[in-house]
Image (cartoon, helix red, strand yellow):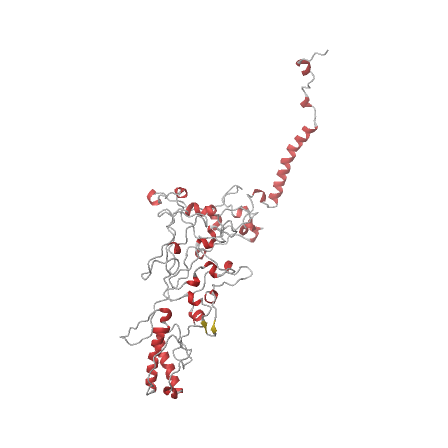
């Protein structure tokens, strides 16, 4: 019978095992030397070839892809691959207007921040890289994520937001004009916080605050939408696009077509086909729309030339026709005794017909200034508003496949010029919502940099710097 003790068992262990060669230990030692050596050779080969991809944090945006392997083009502060891009690195190529100083951190928590004047502290303007994050893949660098906008501009409490620039004249919701009726009550309270679109976005100001259109041109959409409306060739159905045409920027091989806002309504292009400015049934001549100051001499000369060429017309009674609209009837007059009387009488009647009926039909009543003597019509400017959201942008091009009335609801039944037929937030959210597919980021409508004020940059690179 064998007796096993710890001592006898210990004698079986070779205490010098580490001195003898072993296959696994040999390969482990070789690999611990070979792998770092191969890594160093690989890095050396990339450095010799000028390839910096190994140091990159990830792919850069489409606009900067051509310098993806040339880190020093943007990382100008020092030679370290950990150096962040400075403001100067961006301004080397893009000298855009600088961003205003940021509000303090309290604003991001929903609190009204103390102004820098009150605290005596100035808040440094954010660098380009604060909002435009690079190395996020082949993305559009200008498409800033909502959080970068909302963190600073989400608090609209009076005194908390940075004062915006005043909109240029003729754009944006205007101050209530003196003739404006009481504003229609809006369903939205004045916003205090703005968040992601559409759930946390307030209603557009022009609708929220019940603005009326300040235009002086009388227009009735419902009448013009009548399928039995009579045109020059008989009854016709007008479409929205008959009058409302987008300002088209022609497409090229490099840029797609852009339509932006709708072009301003023009009498010659949109109105003259139906609303003619004839002043006499017998004379095939219209009064120029923009030359009312020359109305009396023009009409007098036209009538004088006509009666000189047709003296017998003075004794003929006038027969109503379609040249002068039938809804502007004129009282019959006795036959004139002389050509001068005929011209004077018809010139005075033509002037009053134009100013008090035909022109006033769209522009409102006229008034005279020369001691009661007719001196030509005078009207208020049409004051047609073309841009109701001056701090947002809109391009009709991606929306041309949608019927106008789908967005501008209520236009077919609108009778008043004061009606503002802007789409509401809920209308835009039909497509522009994260769950619907169309982009709903802040930058889709709101831009910051006004590139019309950009400064030219001084060339600093050669083509060889990008090879």
Q: Which quadrant of the structure image shows residue 35?
A: top right
Where residue 290 appears, x then y in whole percent? 39, 72
Left or right of 273: which side holds 177? left
Give the quadrant of the N terminus: top right
Q: Nearer the viewer, residue 232 or 283?
A: 232
Where residue 74 appears, x then y in whole percent? 51, 47
Q: Nearer the viewer, residue 23 or 191?
A: 191
The residue lying furthest to the right in this view is 1
The residue at 36%/86% (across/down) is: 314
Left or right of 293: which side holds 52? right
The residue at 70%/28% (across/down) is: 23
Where residue 337 appears, x then y in whole percent? 32, 88
389 is higher (above) or lower (below) than 153: below
Q: Nearer the viewer, residue 304 or 336?
A: 336
Left or right of 116: which side holds 400? right
Q: Which quadrant of the structure image shows residue 103?
A: top left
Left or right of 121: which side holds 19? right
Q: How many marks?
A: 0
Where residue 410 appears, x then y in whole percent? 43, 60
238 is higher (above) or lower (below) than 60: below
458 is higher (above) or lower (below) than 4: below
The residue lying furthest to the left in this view is 371
């Amino acid at each position: 019978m064998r007796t096993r003790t710890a001592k006898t068992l210990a004698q079986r262990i070779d205490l010098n095992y580490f001195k003898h060669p072993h296959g696994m230990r040999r390969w482990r030692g070789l690999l611990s030397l070979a792998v770092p050596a191969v890594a160093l050779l690989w890095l050396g080969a990339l450095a010799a070839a000028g390839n910096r991809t190994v140091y990159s944090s990830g792919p850069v945006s489409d606009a900067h892809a051509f310098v993806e392997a040339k880190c020093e083009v943007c990382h100008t502060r020092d030679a370290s691959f950990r150096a962040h891009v400075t403001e100067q690195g961006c301004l080397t190529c893009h000298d855009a207007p600088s961003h205003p100083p940021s509000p303090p951190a309290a604003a991001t928590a929903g609190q009204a921040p103390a102004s820098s004047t009150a605290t005596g502290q100035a808040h440094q303007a954010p660098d380009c890289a604060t909002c435009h994050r690079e190395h996020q893949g082949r993305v559009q660098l200008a498409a800033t994520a909502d959080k970068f906008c909302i963190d600073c501009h989400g608090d609209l409490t009076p005194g908390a937001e940075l004062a915006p620039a005043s909109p240029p004249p003729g754009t944006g919701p205007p101050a209530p004009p003196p003739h404006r009726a009481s504003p229609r009550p809006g369903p939205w309270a004045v916003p205090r916080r703005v968040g992601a679109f559409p759930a946390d976005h307030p209603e557009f100001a022009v609708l929220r605050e019940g603005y009326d259109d300040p235009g002086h041109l009388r227009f009735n959409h419902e009448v013009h939408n009548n399928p039995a409306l009579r045109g020059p060739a008989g009854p016709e159905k007008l479409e929205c696009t008959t009058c409302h045409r987008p300002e088209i920027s022609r497409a090229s091989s490099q840029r797609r077509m852009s339509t932006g806002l709708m072009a301003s309504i023009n009498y010659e292009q949109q109105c003259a086909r139906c609303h003619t400015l004839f002043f006499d049934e017998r004379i095939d001549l219209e009064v120029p729309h923009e030359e009312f100051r020359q109305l009396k001499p023009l009409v007098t000369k036209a009538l004088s030339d006509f009666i000189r060429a047709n003296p017998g017309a003075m004794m003929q009674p006038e027969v109503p026709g379609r040249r002068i609209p039938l809804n502007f009837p004129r009282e019959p007059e006795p036959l004139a005794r002389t050509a001068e009387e005929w011209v004077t009488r018809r010139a005075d009647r033509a002037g009053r017909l134009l100013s008090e009926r035909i022109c006033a039909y769209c522009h409102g009543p006229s008034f005279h200034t020369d001691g009661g003597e007719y001196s030509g019509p005078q009207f208020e400017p049409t004051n047609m508003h073309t841009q109701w959201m001056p701090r947002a942008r809109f391009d009709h091009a991606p929306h041309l496949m949608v019927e106008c009335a789908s967005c501008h609801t209520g236009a077919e039944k609108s009778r008043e010029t004061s009606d503002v037929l802007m789409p509401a937030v809920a209308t835009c959210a039909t497509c522009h919502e994260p769950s619907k597919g169309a982009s709903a980021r802040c930058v889709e409508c709101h831009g910051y940099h006004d590139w019309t004020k950009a400064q030219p940059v001084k060339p600093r690179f050669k083509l060889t710097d990008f090879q």
